[in-house]
Image: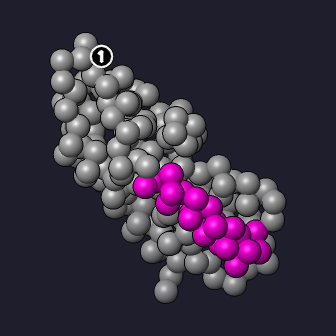
Amino acid sequence: TNVSASFMSFARAKRSEMEDGGPVDRFVQHWGLDSRAADALRGLPREAHEEIMANFRPGSSDNVSASFMAFIKRSRAAQATVVDQGRQGDQVEDFVRHWGLDERAADMMRSLPYDLREEVMSSFNPPATQNVSATFMAFVKRSPRYQQCMEGSQPLNSVERFL
């Protein structure tokens, strides 16, 4: 298959998804969450979004964002994410070994948010190349999600620092 065409199709779908707002953005807007709470939600794996959004009830709190952050911390979905991230850490190391990534590329992979690491591990499959590490880094840098993180709209590891 043509990796470039596959990646472009993937990137267009992700961009369209982000431009549509999606359920996460609607949830953030509905509750008036601040950027820290919104980033914490966006940093969770997609599987956790549904449970978190379906079960959150702020009660009578004056600070909905603080209530939401506490809810995430207590949430089974978020706790499962910590376990998943541990498992994913092993998967990341396997990925680094499989592709023979150099230290710089491996560090880049480890610094990515959970959901972006998942995307990268499932979609990176370059053609034969002399420098897999450079190809990998270029692949990640072309990702719309990575570009958002680098523009400062979403911190790279906001949830990992929070939890």
Which residue lies at the image location 38% right of the left edge and 30% below the top edge?
A: 69
Q: Residue 1 appears at what percent x and percent y?
A: 49, 86
Over which residues does the magenta segment extend? Answer: 80-101
Q: Let me know if residue 83 is in the magenta part.
A: yes
Q: Is 35 located above or below residue 149 in the figure? A: above
Q: Quadrant of residue 35?
A: top left
Specify whether residue 144 is in view. Answer: no
Residue 107 is left or right of residue 119, and the answer is right
Q: Residue 106 appears at what percent x and percent y?
A: 73, 60
Q: Quadrant of residue 109?
A: bottom right
Q: Residues within 10 Å of mark 1 (few under 14, many from 20)?
A: few
Name the residue type under label 1.
Asn
Camera-nearest residue between 100 and 4: 100
Q: Is 36 located above or below residue 158 in the figure? A: above
Camera-nearest residue between 79 and 157: 79
Residue 44 is left or right of residue 89, and the answer is left
The kind of secondary structure element at disc 1 is: loop
Which residue lies at the image location 42% right of the left edge and 61% below the top edge?
A: 11
Q: Which residue is mark 1?
A: 63
Q: Quadrant of residue 24?
A: top left
Camera-nearest residue between 57 and 107: 57
Which residue lies at the image location 33% right of the left edge and 58% below the top edge?
A: 47
* Chosen colour scheme: one colour
Q: Is 135 located above or below residue 73 in the figure? A: below
